[in-house]
Structure formats: C-alpha cells, structure tokens
Image: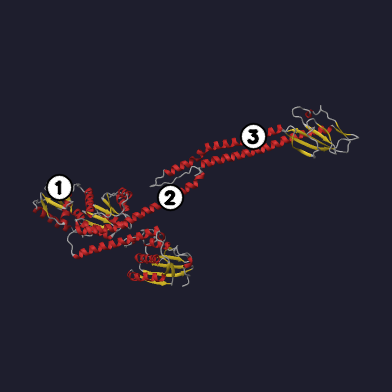
C-alpha cells in the first residue's frame, strides 16, 4: 500500500526537480544565445576589418593585410582564420592558419559552427562584399576558435543540472520534515477513533483540519446511525424478553399457585390448565412471529416464483376470518378483482393473513373493507377498518416491532403482525403503507408487476394487469 | 399484610394475586399504570409489586411519582427486563427490590415479606411478645411450644397486633391491613375475628393477651 508520506516526498521532489531543471534550461538557452550573438558580432567585426583591407583596382582586386590592425590573424596560440576569394573562386589571400585549410570558395552563410585545422570547434562567417570603387564582389570568410564558448556553455549546463538536483533534494527534505506535521491531525483523529468505546460510541467532534471535516462528519453520522440501530435492537431485545417472559411467568405462577394452594375440585384444575394452555398458545404464536421476522430479516430463503391466484388467496383467508369479524362487530365489504400474480404464494398469503388479523384484533366495530383493485402497472389491496385512539403519527409506528396502541396491549398479540407484513411485502417486491385518517386505519399493499414480484422472477413473466 | 399488584398481563396478575391471597394477604390489583398510581396513593400498602411495561403510565413513572410524593412504601419491580442497565435504572428510580420474570412464586412471596418487614415497625421475621411467637414466614403462631391453629384472617389480625405490641391498634388500622379495597368496610367483622383469636390464644394457654381499649382499638399485652 503506497504511503502518503512517500508519495508526497517523491511528488514534491519530482516537481521541484522539473521546475528547477526547466528554469535552468531556459536560463542556459538565454545565456547561450547571448554568448553566441556576442561571439558572432566579434566575428562580424573581424570580417569588416578584413573587408576594409580589400580594395578594387583597375586590373582586379587587391587585398592589404594589415597584421598590425589584425593581430588575431597571426596570434600563436589560437589564431583566427580569414580568407578572401574573387568572383571566380580564386583564393586571393589567406591568413596563415587558413592557408592550406580553406581552398574552395564557400557559399555565403551566416555564422555557423565549423571545424578548425587543429581539430577544435570554431564558428565561421562567410559574406560577399563589393569593395569600394569596384563592380565585382569578393567572398570573405573568417573563423575563430569557439572552444572557450563551448566550455562556458558546458559549465552553465552543469550548474543548471546541479541546481535541479539540489532543488529536488531540498524539496524532498523539506517535505520529509513537513509530512509528519501535516499528518499529525490525521494521526490524532485515528487516535480518537480508536479511543471510541464500542459500547458507548460518542461523536468525534472537531476535525482538526478543514479537509478532514467531511470525513469526520460522515463518521459521526455513521456513529449516530449505529447508536440508533443499537438502541433499536436493545429495545427489540427488551420487548422480545417482555413478550416471551410475561406469558412464561404467567404459566409458571399459575401452575405454582395452583399446586401450592389448597384443595381444588376438577373444575378448578380445568380452569388452571385452560389458563396455562392459552398462555402457552400465546407464547407459541409470539415465538413463531419472532422466528418469521428473524428469517425475513436474514432474507436467507429466496422464496418461490410461480403464478398465484391472488384473489383466491385473499378469499380463502377471508373465509377463515369472516365469523370472527362478525363477532367483533365488523361489517365486511369485500370486493376483489381477479388477479393472477407471479410470486411466492406463502408470502402473499402471509401478508393477507397479517393484515386481516390486525384488522380483527385491533379494529373497532364498524365497516371493514377488503378491496383488491387493478392500478396502473399492478394491483392494490386495501384493508381498512375503524380504529380508536390512533393518531396520524402512529401510522409510521405501527410497523415497529412490538408496537401496540396501549389499549391493545392485552389483546393477546405481540405487535409483530404489521412488521412481518411489511417485511413480507418487501420480500415479494411490493410496498405496504398505513394511513390513519378520520378514525380509520387503512393499510395499502401495492404490488407492481412491471417490477418482478420476486427479485428472482423476471419481470416479463408477470402477466399483464388486464383482468 | 396488604399488597398492591400492578401488572398488565391478566393471567400473571391473577396468579400472583391468588398466590398472595392464599397466604392471607389483602391484595388490590390493577392492570394500568394510572390506576395503579391511584391505588398506591389512595391506600397504604405493606408492599407494591410493580411491572415496568404498563399501559397508561409505565412502572418507572409510577415509581418516580410515588417517591416524588414522599411515599415510602416498599416497591418490588417485577419485570421481563433483565439487563444490568434496566436493574440499575429501576433501583435508582426508587425500587427496593427487582425480580425478573419468570420467577418462582415462593421467592416472590418471600421477597414481599422481606419488603413488608422493612416498612413495618419490627424487622424480625419471628415476632415475639412474651410467650407468644408469630412466625411471619411460616405463617404460624405459637404460645410457648403450643402451635395455634389459625385461619388466614385470624393470623393476619394477630400479625398486625404483634408488630406493635403494647400499642393501641385502631380498628381501622386492622381493617386497612387485613382487607383489600373491594371488601365492604365493617368494623364489626374485626371485633368478631379478634374474638376468635382471643379464644384460640386462651385455648393455647394465654388468656387476656388482647385487651380492648374502648373507643380506640386493641392492644396486644406484652409479657
């Protein structure tokens, strides 16, 4: 895993090296141009000096070398080269160094590098001039040893290169010193995160660096969400404990009180057994609901995927409930469209059962509606019943596990039915919502067939909504 | 002993109530927090058995209101919540004891007796008044070594008198300690039962142990 420290140091060194190298190269190029211009202008001066000795005469051109004026031509160590040719290319005159080295007349050229007789590098300038009073031009070439120039340029290049390397090293060293300081807030943050007590997570608070704030905020949000989830789970465990232990306590206390007490006739014993039995049944129902919910939340079973006569499923469930509905004072209005859905029959049946059970257990006497209609793109099942004492705000709470309106606490239901129904609805790709308005409790199940009813069912397998 | 049971689970409430009545306690019961609070503030109890998850007003709120009102009555929280945090919160709210459901009925009764002793005039489980001894746990009274055969009600009356030997106990006090809220107030019943207890004490060899103080009540003579 690449370390930020290494990356920062290498990056800065590279950048600093590149920048100083570029600056050095630019400086070197400017200096080189200036030096060459200066060199070339001295060549031009030399050429002019040679040219001033060329005079046009009646029979041709005469060249007057004035060695005194042009000492460079005769210097011992690095003599300049100079030569003059006439129009026909005949060498008229050459300096001692040029004699024997230059024979043919060169083409006119601006200053350019050339090889000197001693093998050194020089620069040469070739120009054609028309001497005073003459009509025919002559070609003059001068050259001078440029090894001094080359040497100076080499030194400059070396200095520039060293500056680049030094800059890179300096930047790397600076960064190496700065990185630990820069990373200190990160290390401190890591320390604070590590110090969080998993049992009682607290928000991190100040980030220490503006750049770290988004990360800290995200972490704090995460902590808050985790705390909320944990609180919910704790509440769930407490509720589950209550729902399981209370009937258990009731059975135990009933049996212990019965065996410890005085004599009982058969009727008395039967009453005790009946009480214990009903509590055990209640306990069993709670355990089964809890297991259903746990399985749904684990989502381990994929569910089946086959055409289901949804209308038939609802009708069968309703037939089982109809008598109890009458006993509870509910007048039923059942209106079912013919619907065939591809999905898991057991889950669809579970949703219907829990919705009807909820209406029967908690509905106030009055009109109970069970209506299945086609909606655009799917089906809608509405179960509506009168309710007492529920507020609009309770519409979201009804799906909380173990939530019950106070009045319903002792009705023998653990308050898991709607939580299960919603999970089942999600498991078949539908949605279940509850609305409480005008003392009516309205549960709405939407099954949209353009989405696969089961996540594993392809959408195309679902029949159209036409009934 | 007079006990209040506040528990919303009807079957459990009935079982606890019948177990308490079986051992001679006068018991009031409620399945709702608000009603329970009303009972607790309207009558005086030797102990209260309180559930936490209650409709209306939860058990902890009932407990806090009682303590805020300065009620010293011993309270036992009987609840399904067993986490340490819950026990701490419950005890800190002013509970005297904490019992997790499901519990053994004999243990519940023993804890109730223990709580009742804490709130009563005498802390010892066996109340001794001269030759008379009243074992509140075994619910047995004896004069020297002679065990008396007492009905539940007779024992309750003797127990109340034995808790305050030498003091005048008013008929209304005896009534409050031995009868629940549903019984029809009738001081004549107290006189009748005191008469039964006197007769049984005399039979066991202790005559004139209970004296009548005209217009005030009864005194269990010491020595």
Marks 3 and 1: same chain? no
Observer-nearest of A280 and A344: A344
Q: Nearer the viewer, mark 3 or mark 1?
A: 3
Answer left or right for A367 relative to B184: right
Q: Dot 2, crowdedness within 10 Å: few (<14), some or many (≥20)? A: some
Q: Residue at x 50, y 38 (%)?
A: A180
Residue indicated by mark 1: B128
Could you tell me which secondary element the residue under label 3 belongs to? helix
Answer left or right for A397 relative to B42: right
Q: Position of residue B115 (x, y in %)?
A: 23, 50
The tag on residue A224 is 2
Answer left or right for A409 relative to B1: right
Chain label for disc 2: A
| Mark-to-mark CA distance, 3 and 1 | 114 Å
| Mark-to-mark CA distance, 3 and 2 | 61 Å
Residue indicated by mark 3: A158
Observer-nearest of A250 and A152: A152
Q: Nearer the viewer, mark 3 or mark 2?
A: 3
Chain label for disc 1: B
Could you tell me which secondary element the residue under label 1 belongs to? strand
Observer-nearest of A432 and A391: A432
Instruction: State the residue lying farthest toward the front.
Output: A100
Marks 3 and 2: same chain? yes
């Amino acid at each position: 895993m690449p370390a930020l420290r290494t990356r920062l140091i290498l990056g800065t060194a590279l950048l600093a090296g590149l920048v100083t190298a570029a600056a050095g190269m630019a400086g070197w190029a400017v200096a080189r141009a200036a030096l060459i211009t200066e060199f070339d202008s001295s060549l031009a001066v030399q050429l002019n000096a040679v040219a001033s000795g060329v005079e046009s005469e009646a029979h041709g051109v005469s060249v007057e070398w004035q060695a005194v004026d042009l000492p460079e031509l005769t210097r011992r160590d690095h003599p300049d080269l100079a030569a003059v040719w006439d129009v026909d290319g005949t060498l008229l005159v050459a300096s001692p160094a040029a004699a024997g080295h230059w024979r043919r007349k060169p083409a006119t050229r601006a200053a350019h590098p050339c090889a000197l007789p001693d093998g050194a590098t020089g620069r040469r300038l070739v120009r054609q001039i028309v001497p005073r009073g003459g009509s025919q031009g002559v070609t003059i070439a001068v050259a001078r040893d440029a090894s001094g120039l080359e040497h100076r340029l080499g030194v400059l290049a070396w200095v520039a290169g060293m500056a680049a390397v030094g800059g890179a090293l300096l930047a790397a060293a600076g960064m190496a010193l700065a990185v630990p300081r820069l990373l200190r807030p990160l290390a401190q943050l890591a320390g604070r995160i590590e110090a969080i007590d998993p049992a009682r997570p607290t928000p991190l608070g100040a980030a220490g660096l503006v750049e770290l704030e988004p990360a800290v905020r995200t972490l704090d949000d995460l902590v808050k969400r985790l705390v909320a989830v944990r609180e919910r789970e704790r509440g769930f465990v407490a509720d589950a404990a209550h729902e399981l232990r209370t009937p258990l306590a009731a059975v135990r206390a009933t049996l212990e009180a019965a065996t410890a007490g005085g004599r009982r006739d058969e009727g008395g014993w039967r009453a005790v057994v009946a009480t214990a039995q009903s509590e055990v049944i209640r306990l069993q129902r709670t355990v089964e609901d809890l297991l259903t919910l746990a399985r749904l939340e684990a989502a381990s079973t994929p569910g089946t995927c086959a055409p289901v006569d949804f209308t038939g499923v609802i009708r069968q469930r309703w037939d089982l409930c109809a008598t109890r509905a009458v006993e509870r004072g509910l007048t039923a209005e059942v209106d079912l469209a013919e619907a065939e859905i591809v999905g898991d029959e057991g889950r669809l049946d579970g949703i219907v059962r829990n919705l009807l059970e909820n209406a029967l257990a908690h509905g106030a006497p009055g009109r109970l509606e069970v209506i299945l209609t086609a909606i655009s793109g799917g089906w809608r099942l509405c179960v509506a019943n009168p309710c007492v004492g529920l507020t609009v705000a309770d519409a979201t709470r009804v799906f909380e596990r173990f939530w019950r309106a106070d009045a319903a606490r002792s009705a023998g239901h653990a308050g898991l039915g709607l939580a299960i129904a919603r999970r089942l609805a999600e498991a078949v790709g539908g949605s279940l919502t509850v609305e409480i308005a005008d003392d009516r409790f309205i549960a709405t199940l939407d099954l949209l067939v353009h989405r696969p009813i089961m996540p594993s069912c392809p959408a195309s397998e679902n029949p159209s909504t036409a009934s | 002993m007079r006990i209040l049971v506040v528990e919303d689970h009807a079957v459990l409430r009935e079982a606890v109530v019948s177990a308490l009545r079986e051992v001679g306690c006068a018991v009031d019961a409620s399945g709702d927090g608000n009603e329970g609070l009303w009972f607790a503030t309207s009558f005086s109890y030797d102990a209260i058995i309180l559930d936490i998850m209650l409709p209306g007003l939860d058990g902890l709120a009932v407990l806090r209101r009682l303590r805020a009102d300065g009620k010293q009555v011993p309270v036992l929280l009987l609840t399904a919540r067993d986490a340490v945090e819950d026990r701490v919160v419950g005890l800190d709210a002013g509970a005297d004891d904490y019992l997790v459901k499901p519990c053994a009925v004999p243990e519940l009764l023993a804890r109730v007796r223990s709580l009742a002793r804490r709130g009563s005039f005498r802390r010892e489980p066996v109340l001794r008044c001269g030759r008379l001894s009243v074992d509140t746990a075994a619910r047995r009274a004896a004069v020297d070594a002679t065990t008396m055969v007492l009905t539940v009600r007779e024992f309750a009356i003797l127990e109340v008198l034995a808790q305050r030997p030498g003091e005048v106990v008013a008929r209304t006090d005896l009534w409050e300690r031995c009868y629940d809220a549903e019984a029809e107030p009738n001081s004549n019943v107290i006189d009748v039962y005191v008469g039964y207890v006197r007769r049984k004490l005399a039979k066991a060899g202790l005559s004139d142990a209970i004296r009548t103080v005209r217009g005030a009540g009864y005194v269990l003579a010491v020595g």
